[in-house]
Amino acid sequence: MAKTVLINPGSECEIYSATEPLNLGFIAGYLEKNGVEVRIIDEMANENPIKMINELKPDMVGITATTPLVTRAYEIADYCRDRKILTIMGGVHASVLSEEALKHCDIVVKGEGEQAILDIVKNGMRQKIVSMPYIKNLDEIPPPARHLFKMNFYLKSGERLPTHTYNFAPKGSNTAALMCSRGCPYNCTFCHNSWREMPFRFNSAERVISEIKSLIERYNVNAIFFLDDDMFANNPRLKKICETIIKEKFNILWSCAARSNNLSSEILELARESGCVKINFGFESGSQKILNVLNKKNTLEENQKAIDLCRKAKIEPCGSFMIGNPTETMEDINLTRQFIRRSKLKYKSILITTPFPGTKLWE
């Protein structure tokens, strides 16, 4: 069977090294479950992909290609293909701009990669563009193959990175990332989730608890950053997760992202009791006109209410905002400035709007 290596390209921007590359971890776990030997080369964790490719001599490599890292991904892909290694690319950028990616690789996997990569590795599938149906039951996918990561590097991401998003636990904590849903029911114009209709799916509460237990037992984790787009999108499931964390005395801290219109005092108080200390919101703008342009499907009043509810529950609300949106004027920017000042957010990020391939904004 083909010797398989998955590669996470690197970047000089440290923020991309904040969490384990769980996308590759899920694929690796799925391959291992089906009897495929696989390695992960993680340039973000200071592993040298060129050196390791020469040492491992794989028959097949899979490279993830997101827009910010695509130049480096193409460099690695070119190196592999020049050496007659079957080169596969996946990720949002390669999925959207498949013809561009095929100039650097042999096969592009569009969308979720677990079954597609398995078919290529084990069954010899060789069509240039491979697209598989979405996996309906996420519990059927094994947890990420974390033993293939340099976990000691990622456990201390909160200390390595000054950004408030990941630095939410006391110094000395062991922090791990966890993803327990896929997709998003919303369709914001700037978000990569809008490139293809993707059903919103969740791991069961039981699966989430099992993975948390494993992180605690194997890596002494006491802080978890949930990578889901909206941890509060399924409140009955979250309620069960929080109640189990409290009942079994996991004694962890956790942080996540959420939308402002999915919160209630009850679920926030339960989340805080279970260890939630910080919630990141994509508020984007202080102008309702711009929120509508971005298809956010919420209001300024809901955003302010979310801040107030978090503070009442003793959870730190954090907000991200974007400047340079379509139709945006100085008046809109001033409204954003006023919202930030009025809300008195301790932690906020102000970013330049970027039209990523596949988004409505790009189109």
Image (cartoon, helix red, strand yellow):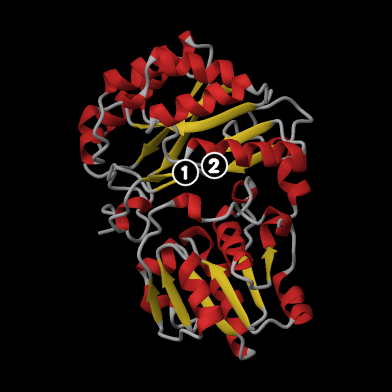
Q: For the residue labelled by badge 2, is the local secondary structure a helix, a strand or a loop?
A: helix
Q: Residue furthest top?
A: 312
The one nearer the camera, 239 or 10, is: 239
What residue do we see at 62% from left, 69% from top? 6
Q: For the residue labelled by badge 1, is the local secondary structure a helix, a strand or a loop?
A: loop
The one nearer the camera, 23 or 215, is: 215
Residue 183: x and y in percent read 37, 48
Q: Quadrant of the N terminus?
A: bottom right
Which residue position is annotated with label 2?
207
Marks 1 and 2: CB-CB under 8 Å?
yes
Q: How many marks?
A: 2
Left or right: 47 in relation to 180: right
> Is residue 83 placed above or below 174 in the rendered structure?
below
Residue 143: x and y in percent read 59, 51
Q: Which mark is residue 337?
A: none
- Residue 26 makes an appearance in the image: yes
The one nearer the camera, 145 or 65, is: 145
Left or right: 67 in relation to 50: left
What residue do we see at 52% from left, 42% from top? 227
- Residue 319 makes an appearance in the image: no
Which residue position is annotated with label 1?
203
Q: Identity of the amino acid at label 2?
A: Arg
Q: Identity of the amino acid at label 1?
A: Asn
